[in-house]
Image (cartoon, rainbow, N blue to C red):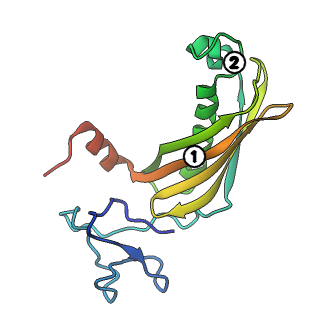
Amino acid sequence: MYAVPRTPSPQTTYVTNPTNPTNVTNPTNPTNPTNVTNPTNPTNELMQPMNQSITPGISHEMTFEVTPEYSAAHIGSGTAQVLSTPCMILFMERTAQRLLAQHLPEGYTSVGTLVNVRHLAATPVGETVRVRAEVLAVDGRRVTLAVDARDSRQQIGAGQHERFIVNEARFLQKVTGEEGD
């Protein structure tokens, strides 16, 4: 349930200490839980655990109106005036992101890394879609969620979505290539 903000190098494994859940413990030195440093973090910044409130079973729901700009005809994934599959996935990702954002410390966010969903039924423009995301598992910084979408008549989509928790500033530095030496 606890994670290191930065991915450790492949040869280094970090685990949490169940008797001291506020600190990350290096298995090669379990007697020093408060001063564990990551070899990929040359400033020796202390590891910080993620918020403990991200646990299996927490969930969040959001509703979305299917407007013409979310239609298959508008985005080019089809010709019908129905909710497009990419926009249904957008609704699912947004709901999952908002769920996790409620539980993350300042400066952290989550990024989508995997979507495996089925679009089960068409929803016409003008309908409202209710989307639910529920945490299934937490493995370090990886969070696996069940996602489900329904309109007023039926389930329209379901599947799993995976997100990674990242330090937003570090993530953006890495993406833009502005990492310091």
Instruction: Name the front one of labels 1 and 2.
Output: 1
Quarter residue 76 falls in: top right
Residue type at numbered disc 1: His
Residue depicted at x 58% and y 42%: 116
Q: What mark, if any, has residue 40 been given in the picture?
A: none
Crowding near pointer 2: few (<14 within 10 Å), some, many (20+)?
some
Return the disc, 1 or 2, that comes first in the chain's sequence.
2
| Residue occupied by mark 1 | 161
Which residue occupies the extreme left position in the image? 181
For badge 2, the amino acid type reads Thr
Q: Secondary structure at mark 1?
A: strand
**With respect to residue 107, does 35 lie above or below?**
below
Element at label 2:
loop
How far apart marks 1 and 2 lie (CA) works out to: 24 Å
Q: Residue at x 30, y 49 (%)?
A: 170
Q: Is residue 133 above or below residue 72?
A: below
> Would you place residue 119 above or below residue 16 in this image?
above
Q: Residue at x 68, y 49 (%)?
A: 60
Residue 122: x %, y % from top left: 75, 24
In the image, 149 versus 11, the foreground residue is 11
Quarter-wise, where is residue 42 in the image? bottom left
Q: Position of residue 168 (x, y in %)?
A: 38, 47
Residue 107 seen in render = no
Q: Is residue 59 above or below residue 90?
A: below
Tell me the quarter of the picture where residue 12 sits: bottom left
Q: List the residue tagged with mark 2.
A: 67
Give residue 47's position: percent from left, percent from top.
34, 69
